[in-house]
Image (tube, rainbow, N blue to C red):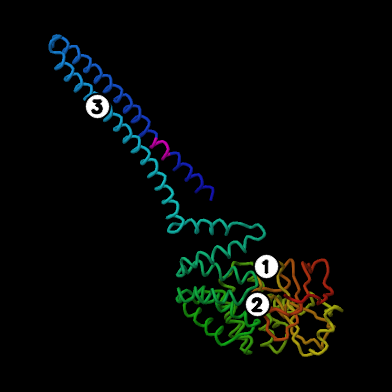
């Protein structure tokens, strides 16, 4: 924005210089010319009067006076015309200044509506990491999309922003807009599938599976689609297909990256299930490492005791079947939970434990995240998406390095 303010200031200075060069010398020249013409007219008048006095003796006084009156009248007319000319020239200068100012204002207004000023603002907001910047960015994107409804890029930005801020329904709406504008983009198709997966409470729906297949048809190397395809295959019990999908994703990941290691651990777990629950085959170092990964997956990383606060307990006496969602996600990170469990109010108080083996995504394990947030929410409707009237409790940030056992109180009713 500072660049455009400087550009505007430079434009203003340039316009001022042009007006100065056009007007000030012109005014000086006009003034000099006017004074010269006035002096010349006066000199000519005096010479004419002297000539009349020489040509007309006293006995022709009447004729001389008549000619003198005509000469005075002509001198007066010349002076009046010179003054009128200066007035017109002054008015022309004023008009030039007015037109220049109007053109500048018009240029700014037209640029604000037809130019890229809003795009520059959005670019600056994307780089802004201060608290509350996401809300300002969301408002700017919505406003810009009212003007450019066919902007694929802005719909995609809005969708990602909504998903990162735990608004899966709004994210799905924006992703559908982007997907409609670019149906052949594998990345957008896979991201829409992921948003629908989150919206459905991390359940695989027919639409999610259809979109995953569509994304892989467009790009066999889309890692997000490969990961979701592996989850879908694993949920059907088709472990070999899941392993194939995740192995392909590992090949596309950077060697030694956290995501690649997590995927390898998931592959090892599924391989063990294929081997009737063994922790790896007894051949070689690779199978030994796979067994170690499986053992690590079963280790309890986080234990919780969840109970109701006194102020909300009475309102749930008649609702023992209301759903209790308990999920763990990265503190101030993506909204997609790392692990989740489902209970009812009748189960409270309840002891809950989480391991890497319970991870909802093979690409993101509980043990790979430094800080966590736990959310326990009671929903009468059974909807995973938070709604007015739900009761919840939150705990975070938590570190698995310092402590693994915590207590969580459900005490807040959502407005």
Residue labelled with disc 2: 362
Give the image quarter of residue 290. Answer: bottom right
Residue labelled with disc 1: 333
> Between tags 3 and 1, which lies in front?
3
Does 379 appear in magenta?
no
Q: How far is the residue under mark 3 from the one under mark 1?
A: 85 Å
Position of residue 380 in the picture relative to residue 204 (left or right): right
The x, y position of residue 317, in whole percent, is 83, 88
Q: Which residues are magenta?
A: 14-19
Q: How far is the residue under mark 2 from the one under mark 3?
A: 97 Å
The x, y position of residue 270, in whole percent, is 66, 83
| Residue occupying image coordinates x 58% and y 74% | 171
Residue labelled with disc 3: 78
Q: Nearer the viewer, residue 65 or 254?
A: 65
The x, y position of residue 218, in whole percent, is 47, 77
Q: Nearer the viewer, residue 14 or 352?
A: 14
Q: How far is the residue under mark 1 from the one under mark 2?
A: 17 Å
Q: Nearer the viewer, residue 288 or 37?
A: 37
Position of residue 123 in the picture relative to residue 46 (left or right): right
């Amino acid at each position: 924005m500072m660049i455009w303010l400087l550009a505007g200031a430079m434009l203003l200075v340039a316009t001022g210089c042009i007006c100065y060069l056009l007007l000030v010398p012109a005014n000086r020249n006009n003034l000099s010319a006017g004074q010269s013409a006035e002096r010349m007219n006066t000199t000519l008048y005096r010479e004419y009067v002297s000539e009349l006095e020489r040509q007309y003796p006293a006995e022709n006084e009447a004729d001389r006076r008549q000619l003198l009156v005509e000469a005075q009248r002509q001198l007066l007319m010349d002076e009046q015309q010179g003054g009128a000319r200066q007035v017109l020239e002054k008015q022309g200068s004023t008009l030039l200044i007015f037109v220049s100012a109007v053109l500048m204002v018009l240029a700014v207004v037209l640029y604000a509506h037809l130019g890229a000023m809003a795009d520059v603002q959005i670019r600056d907001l994307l780089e802004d990491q201060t608290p509350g910047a996401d809300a300002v960015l969301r408002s700017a994107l919505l406003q810009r999309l009212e003007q450019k409804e066919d902007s694929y890029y802005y719909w995609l930005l809005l969708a990602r922003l909504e998903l990162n801020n735990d608004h899966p329904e709004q994210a799905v709406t924006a992703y559908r807009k982007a997907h409609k504008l670019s149906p052949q983009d594998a990345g957008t198709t896979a991201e829409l599938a992921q948003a629908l997966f989150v919206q459905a409470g991390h359940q695989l729906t027919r639409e999610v599976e259809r979109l995953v297949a569509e994304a892989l048809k467009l790009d066999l190397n889309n890692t997000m689609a490969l990961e979701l395809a592996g989850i879908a295959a694993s949920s059907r019990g088709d472990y070999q297909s899941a392993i194939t999908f995740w192995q392909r994703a590992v090949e596309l990941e950077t060697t030694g990256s956290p995501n690649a290691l997590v995927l390898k651990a998931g592959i090892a777990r599924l391989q063990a299930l294929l081997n009737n629950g063994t922790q790896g085959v007894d051949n070689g170092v690779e199978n030994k490492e796979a067994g170690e990964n499986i053992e690590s997956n079963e280790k309890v990383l986080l234990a919780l005791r969840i109970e109701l606060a006194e102020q909300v307990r009475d309102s749930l006496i008649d609702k023992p079947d209301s759903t209790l969602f308990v999920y763990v996600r990265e503190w101030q990170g993506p909204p997609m939970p790392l692990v989740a469990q489902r209970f009812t109010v009748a189960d409270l108080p309840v002891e809950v434990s989480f391991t890497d083996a319970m991870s909802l995504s093979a690409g993101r394990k509980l043990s790979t995240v430094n800080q966590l947030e736990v959310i326990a929410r009671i929903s009468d409707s059974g909807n995973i998406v938070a709604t007015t009237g739900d009761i919840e409790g939150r705990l975070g940030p938590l570190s698995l390095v310092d402590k693994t056992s915590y207590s969580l109180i459900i005490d807040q009713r959502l407005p």
